[in-house]
Image (spheres, helix red, strand yellow):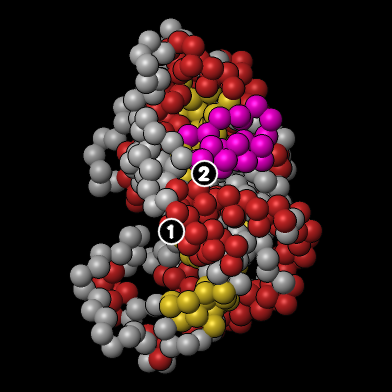
Amino acid sequence: MSDAYHAVPAELRLDALWKPFTANRQFRAAPRLVVGAEGVHYRAADGRRILDGCSGLWCVNAGHGRREIVEAIQAQAARLDYAPAFQMGHPGEFRLAERLAAMAPPGLDHVFFVNSGSEAVDTALKIALAYHQLRGEGTRTRLVGRERAYHGVNFGGLSVGGIGANRRLFGPLLPGVDHLPHTHHPEHNAFSRGQPAWGAHLADALEDLVALHGAGTIAAVIVEPMMGSAGVYLPPVGYLERLRALCDRHGILLIFDEVITGFGRLGAAFAAERFGVVPDLMTVAKGLTNGAVPMGAVLVSEAVHRTFMEAAATPIELFHGYTYSGHPLACAAGLATLGVYEDEGLFARAAELAPAWEDAIHALRGRRHVTDLRNLGLVGAVELEPRPGAPGARGFEAFLRCFERGVLVRVTGDVIALAPPLVIERAHIDELLGVLAEVLETID
Ligand SMILES: Cc1ncc(COP(=O)(O)O)c(C=O)c1O
C-alpha cells in the first residue's frame, strides 16, 4: 500500500481518540481518513475519490453533501439552536413526526424521537414493557430477540441482540431474555436471489418459548426484518408473516428494528411495506436524516399509544426521554431528507435498480473464496470462506484492498456488505463490483 493512502494532515495526533468498533492499534499505525464527500463519493485525506459502497454506515441513502439538507441545518441553527425536549416544544418536531407517520405503514401513527438506533431500540423495549403494565398484564416482562441480531450497543439492545462478541464482556445483561434461532443456513439457502425459499418454519421457535414460559410472560419480540450488521441475512419467504401471526395469537408485541431497512434500502419506504407485515412498534435512525445529524425514532401503533394516553395514572405518561430528543437541527435535517427522498422518488429508484444490482452481485458466483451471495433491494452481501484458524482475516484484507483501490465496503467477519446510496448509477455498480471481483483474485 502506498504511503499516500495513509496520509494524515501534519497537525493531527491520533492517540487521544478511542474509536468505536475499530481496531484502534492497527488503525493508528495505518489510518484511513476521509475529509470530504459528495454524491456517491468520499474524498480521502490524500485527495483520492472513494466510491461509497455502504452509504457511510448504511445511513447516507440520498448521497453525500445534499444541498437541501445542508441549507436546512444551517438555517435552523441560526433560527433556533435548541429547545428543551421536556415540557416544551418547537414546530419542527411536530412537522417531522407527522411526515414520518404519513410515510410509515398505516397504523403506526405516533413518533417518539431519540438520537440513535441504540436509543430507539431501548426506548421501544421500555415502551413495550410499560404498555403491558398499563394494561394490567404486568407479568409480561420477557423479551425475545434473535441469534446474530444487532440492535445497537445499549443494555436493552445488547440483551436482545445475538452477536457474541458484542455481549461477552458486559456481564449478565437484562434478565428474562430469549433468542429465536437465526435464519442463515447455507446448506438450504446459499446463493438465493432475494428472500430464501427455505426457513419460514424457524419462526415457530416462538411457540416453543410460549410453551416453556407461558404467553402471559412475554412482552415483545424484536427482529430486524432483514438482518444487516451481522452479515445481511434475509428473512425466508413467509417468516415474518408467521412471526406476526404468532405474536397476534399470543398477545405479544412485534417490534421491527428498521434502523438499516428504513428509508428505501429495500426499495420501499420501510421493510414493513416491502414485506407487507406491519409491526406494533418500529425503530428507525440512520437514513432518517441521511446521516447528517444524529437522530432516531420509535414509531408506535395507535393501540399502544392510546393505552398510554388513557391508562397512565401520572400526568407524564412515559418517564423516558433524552435531552436531545427531537433536536431542532435533527428535525430540520430529517424534514429536508424526507423531502429529497420524496421529490426524487428515491425509494422507487432503489426498486428499479434492484434487478441490475442483483445480477451484478450474483455475477461474483464462482469467484475465488466466495461461498454465498445475498441481495435484496440495494443491499448485497458477499460471503467469503474464512482462512483456516483466522476468521475475519480474509474479509478485512478485502476491505483494505478495496479502499486502496478507491472503493469503500463494509466488512463483518468474512462477509462483505454492500449498501450504496440510492442515487448510485449503473456505472458505479459496475465499478463497485468490478473492484471487488479483482480484489478477490488478489488475496489469499
Ligand atoms: C438494526 C440496527 N439497530 C440498531 C442499530 C444501532 O444504531 P446506532 O449505531 O445509531 O446506535 C443499528 C446500527 O447499525 C442497526 O443496524
Judge whether residue 109 is colored magenta: yes
> Which of the 4 image quarters holds residue 26?
bottom left
Position above or below: 79 against 398: above
Position above or below: 322 against 80: above
Q: What secondary structure is found at the residue carrying circle 1?
A: helix
In this picture, residue 372 sits left or right of residue 14: right
Label 2: how many Cα within 10 Å (few below 14, some 14–19, many 20+): many
Residue at the far left: name it.
Answer: 16
In this picture, residue 195 sits left or right of residue 179: right
Residue 78 numbered mark, or none? 1
Depth order, front residue of 309/212: 309
Q: Can you give x and y, in whole percent of width and height, for residue 79 in the image?
A: 45, 54
Residue type for callout 2:
Gly
Q: Quadrant of the N terminus?
A: bottom left
Residue 5 numbered mark, or none? none
Position above or below: 47 against 398: below
Q: Can you give x and y, in whole percent of width and height, for residue 206 in the image?
A: 54, 25
Residue pointed to by mark 2: 92
Residue type for callout 1:
Ala
Q: Can you give x and y, in whole percent of width and height, for residue 31 in the image?
A: 34, 78
| Residue name at image x 60 percent, y 40 percent | 100
Q: Tell me how far mark 2 sits from mark 1, CA to CA.
A: 14 Å
Q: What secondary structure is found at the residue carrying circle 2?
A: helix
Label 1: how many Cα within 10 Å (few below 14, some 14–19, many 20+): few
Magenta highlight range: 91-112
Q: Earlier in the sequence, mark 2 or mark 1?
A: 1
| Residue name at image x 49 percent, y 11 percent | 310
> Which of the 4 image quarters holds residue 119?
top left
| Residue name at image x 71 percent, y 47 percent | 268
